[in-house]
Image (cartoon, rainbow, N blue to C red):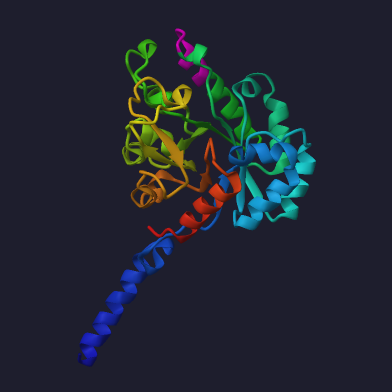
Amino acid sequence: MNRRTFIGTSVAATLATAARPSWAADSAHKIDRIGVQLYTVRNAMKTDFEGTLAKVAATGYKEVEFAGYFDHSPKDVRTILDKNALASPSCHVGYDVVEKKWPEALEAAKIVGHSYMVCPWIDEKQRVEPGGWKRAVDLFNKAGEASKKAGIQFAYHNHSFEFDPAAFLGGKLPYDFFLAELDPKFVAMELDLCWISVAGKDPLVYFEKYPGRFPLVHVKDWIKDASTPSTYQGAMGQSVKFGGRMADVGQGSVDWKRIFAQSGKAGIKHYFVENDEPKSAFDDIKISYDYLHALRF
């Protein structure tokens, strides 16, 4: 290679490197701060709240998402988080809290340090009544506007039933209805990547159509098994016909590399491991952590 060719090649390589996004170094992206939804270790949280958070931190997790404070004050929760070098960017709150106790919940969230508050469930009775989904949209937009003023982002977390055609929506999917009717300034989406996959839908289709709408995701895996009757029918909805069971991340059928390669388009900022029914909670979150820590995409 002569000097001119060498210089030209070097300049081209330098420009190509500069043009790549910062996360693309070594042609791979990784998750820097892996989080866990504490519902996974809820039984341990009931008996040893502080010790459970210490074990979560020792596993390597840097972020946690709460599903209740187990009778601890927001101030105490924040103290325990700080002690274990943990951040809690998000928490789950019930529909009734959003509806009836929102100002108090926002105050607690600010003390703990949450940037997001997520409603994870709509009661089945409301889902099948005329106007039930629209009533949820109205409540969420209102709550989201109030939370925005408080410096906190409201979000909604899905299961699979939102991908069942709804009679009172003219056969439209409730999830599509939400994305069309929820104000993106006030309501973000926490996409459960397992449940959307179980419903037979492709997360990448939603990333393409609604870029930046998914700052939070739940990361859990699923093993399809026709011989295993599902124990999650309440979450799965009527359209899901196959059986199966949850698995630790990387041990099931979800193609994580394919999905996370589009994290930038989706707007994902926080990744929360979850297993609704772990066999051994601390072993399970360790297996999932190790897989995600080593994952490159």
**From where the camera sits, is residue 180 visible?**
no
For residue 170, side relative to residue 217 (left or right): left
Number of disc labels: 0
The reply to whether the magenta stretch includes residue 206 is: no
**From where the camera sits, is residue 291 visible?**
yes
Q: Could you tell me which residue is drawn at 33 percent across and 29 percent down?
A: 242
> For residue 160, what is the image quadrant?
top left
Foreground residue, 236 or 149? Answer: 236
Foreground residue, 154 or 200? Answer: 200
For residue 8, side relative to residue 253 (left or right): left
| Residue 41, horizontal then vertical, whole percent | 62, 41
> For residue 110, what is the image quadrant?
top right
Q: Main secondary structure of the magenta part?
A: helix
User: Residue farthest to the front?
Assistant: 227
| Residue 261, horizontal then vertical, whole percent | 36, 52
User: Residue farthest to the bottom?
Assistant: 2
User: Residue farthest to the top?
Assistant: 130
Q: Could you tell me which residue is drawn at 57 percent across and 46 percent down?
A: 36
Q: Could you tell me which residue is drawn at 51 percent across and 11 percent down?
A: 125
Foreground residue, 271 or 131? Answer: 271
- Image quarter (top left, top right, bottom left or bottom right) of the N terminus: bottom left
| Residue 281, horizontal then vertical, whole percent | 59, 44
For residue 249, side relative to residue 33 (left or right): left
> For residue 199, what is the image quadrant?
top left
From what the image shows, is residue 170 above or below residue 279? above
- Image quarter (top left, top right, bottom left or bottom right) of the C terminus: bottom left
For residue 74, side relative to residue 135 (left or right): right
Foreground residue, 195 or 117? Answer: 195
Q: Could you tell me which residue is drawn at 43 percent across and 35 percent down?
A: 245
Residues rendered magenta in the picture: 128-137
